[in-house]
Image: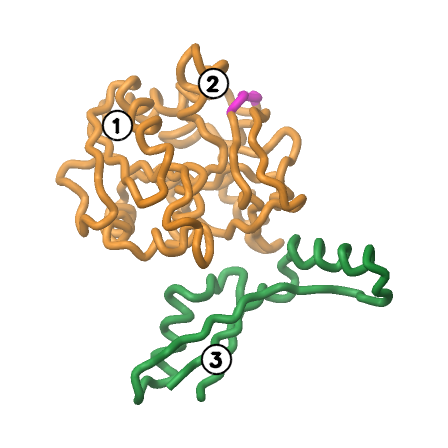
Chain colours: A green, B orange
Amino acid sequence: MKARVHVMLKEGVLDPQGEAVRHALGALGFEGVGGVRQGKVIELDLADGTTEEQVTQMCEQLLANTVIEKYEIELN
Amino acid sequence: MKAAVITFPGSNCDRDLAVAFENAGAEVVRVWHKDSELPSGIDVVGIPGGFSFGDYLRCGAIAANSPICRGVVEHANRGGYVLGICNGFQVLTETRLVPGALIRNMNLKFVCKTVGLKVEQTDSIFTGGYVAGSEIQIPIAHHDGNYRADDALLERLKGEGQIAFTYAENPNGSAGDIAGVFSDNRRVLGMMPHPERAAEVVHGSTDGQALFRALVDGLVSA
């Protein structure tokens, strides 16, 4: 089985890299891009039977820094 | 007085940190990241700068979960002293031994220069050798030194006197101009600037010496 974890900075935490991407899009002539937030996607190859709870623990302990980041788990 | 200096794959300031401790009079034991326990009788643990584990995932995240860091957390929870510099500060935020988090510099650039630091808190074993409010010259060299704390945390840090140093001119976007913070009991200090790079005359500044001397002298007399 596979899991996909999306990690994003929490709302309110500034994202200097996202801001740089927003500026770059403006410089390319794309108008109306009001904001860009950059995160990461982590794909996990897991043993069958791994529970969502176990993936949640992976997120809490390592994959995300919950002081500044939030995460979402997609299991399939 | 015995100091442990930890080396992770990618640490590059571990030797400098060990020398700074030794020059201040400490006995230094070098510790490898795979060791699961600190040697006995350690008074202070130094977590050095560098790029532990290639800064993969997040700076300091993988080091914070290494076997030795469990020992460091236990040491701190027993009231032990810990000094984390640069990448060491990032490791300390990842272990939650100091509050807040560090992200990419506001201007996205790696900043490498000597900066002015204001000494905010002298009531600690690390900063007792400085004059409160004085400005010292210490080098910084980092890409991810932008300290993040929400308003509530900033208020708490100010109220509890947990801010050790602030930047005279903010080089990285840090909230509250914060360059170094203490744990609740002020026995753990995380700071982005490198006092071990300003500890000998040949370094160009000796303003970092007072930190190591105060620490060693304080622990010898303790």
* Mark 1 → mark 2, Cα distance in angstroms: 20 Å
The dominant secondary structure in magenta is strand
Residue B125, picture quadrant: top left
Q: What residue lies at 13% left-to-right and 40% top-to-bottom?
A: B40
Q: Nearer the viewer, residue B70 or B79?
A: B70
Q: Which residue is mark 2?
A: B207
Instruction: Say what amino acid the circle numbered 1 marks.
Output: Leu
- Identified by mark 2, the residue type is Asp
Q: Which numbered dot is residue B92?
A: none
| SS at circle 1 | helix
Who's the residue at 32% across and 45% down the image?
B9
Q: Chain of mark 2?
A: B
Which residue is label 3 attached to? A73
Residue type, mark 3 in image: Ile
Instruction: Classify residue A45 as left or right of residue A71.
Output: left
- Residue position marked by numbered label 1 in the rendering: B219
Residue drawn at x 80%, y 65% as measured from the top left = A34
